[in-house]
Amino acid sequence: MTKKFVSGGLGSSEFWAMVNGLWPGKPQFTESDYPKLDGKVVIVTGATAGFGYETKDAIKRLELEIAKEFGKTNLNVDHVLVDFAVLTTIKPAAEEFLKKESRLDIIIHNAGVMNAPDGSVTKQGFELHIGTNNLGPHLLEKFLDPIIIKTSQTNKPGGTRIVWVSSFTHYFSSKGGLFYSNPNFRNTKAVSAYKYGQSKAISILQAKGWNSAHPGGSNIISVSLCPGFLHTELTRHSSAFEQYMASIMTYHVRNGAYTELFAAFSPGLSSGDHIESFGRLTKAREDLEDPVAISKAWDYLDSNVASYICLNMSVSKTLN
């Protein structure tokens, strides 16, 4: 039986969010405003392309300036290979990181896919957007929760952060964020924007739900963001016409880095905040603020990654 997907729809607040996305103004929080990061450890997922690369590059340049100022040369930029569409690659990647580092100050869940061809699934059979954009990061965060909570106990309040990259397209998700009757959109006619939009609504729910699920992480700020309307490699699955329209309606990826780094470094943020381009507090869709919707989404994610955490004890031992 074919199930019908119904989007949450667009209203006046969504209209103005689109207007702000098309004409966001210049970034007000840039390199000169960032705090010193000496001794800090930052993870940016998906940092090989797009605004993830720009974010990593901005952090790297900031560290080089610090090294030059203090005569230090201890900057270390490392890479760990992980495929978020293959859940079995995530634990080895987390363990590799934990062998190298004894702290984690900031993680930016930036990696993702958009407009994947109809029928695309992960190695484990999940619809590709929800699998790559949500389940993969959720599982990675499970393995890294102990180290980031431990690090937060040595940092000032707000100095430890978890950033979840969402999108304006969260407005295209069903009410409550997930199409619970068929979250993998099997045998359902739904355009790619709805699938991507669902994954980005879930990112907001992850940001809002993390602290409730982790009482020991009260010193950690978990936020979500829409990086802005950017011309990135995420459009590689789009049609030639869609790519052309994106090229004339979007901004350079460097601006997305400014949004991410505002979320990672800007003072005055609180857990659950949502940020839009290019560094401005805003509100996500109202139904995604509902504690019931947040808890329900968190339980869904937990239940779908649970079988991939069986060796979590080896990660915990690394922290002792």
Image (cartoon, rainbow, N blue to C red):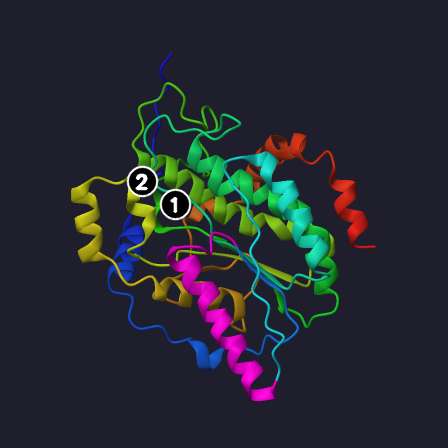
Q: Quadrant of residue 305?
A: top right
| Residue that protrudes farthest toward the right in the picture | 320
Q: Majority secondary structure of the magenta segment?
A: helix
Q: Quadrant of the N terminus?
A: top left
Residue to which mark 1 is pinned = 170
Q: Quadrant of residue 319?
A: bottom right
Residue to which mark 2 is pinned = 9
| Residue that protrudes farthest toward the front in the picture | 73
Picture disc at residue 197:
none
Residue at coordinates 38% horizontally, 50% vertically from top-left? 167
Q: Quadrant of the C terminus?
A: bottom right
In terms of secondary structure, where does tag 1 sit? helix
Instruction: Residue 215: say if magenta.
Output: no
Residue at coordinates 70% horizontally, 70% vertically from top-left? 155
- Regarding residue 319, the answer to whether it shows in the image is yes
Q: Foreground residue, 40 or 261? A: 40
In the rendered structure, which amino acid carries the disc numbered 1? His
Query: In the figure, is residue 125 to the left or right of 115?
Result: right
In the rendered structure, which amino acid carries the disc numbered 2? Gly
Q: Position of residue 103 (x, y in %)?
A: 70, 62
Residue at coordinates 66% horizontally, 45% vertically from top-left? 142
Q: Position of residue 212 (x, y in %)?
A: 65, 49
| Residue that protrudes farthest toward the top in the picture | 1
Which stretch is magenta? 45-71
Instruction: Residue 57: say if magenta.
Output: yes
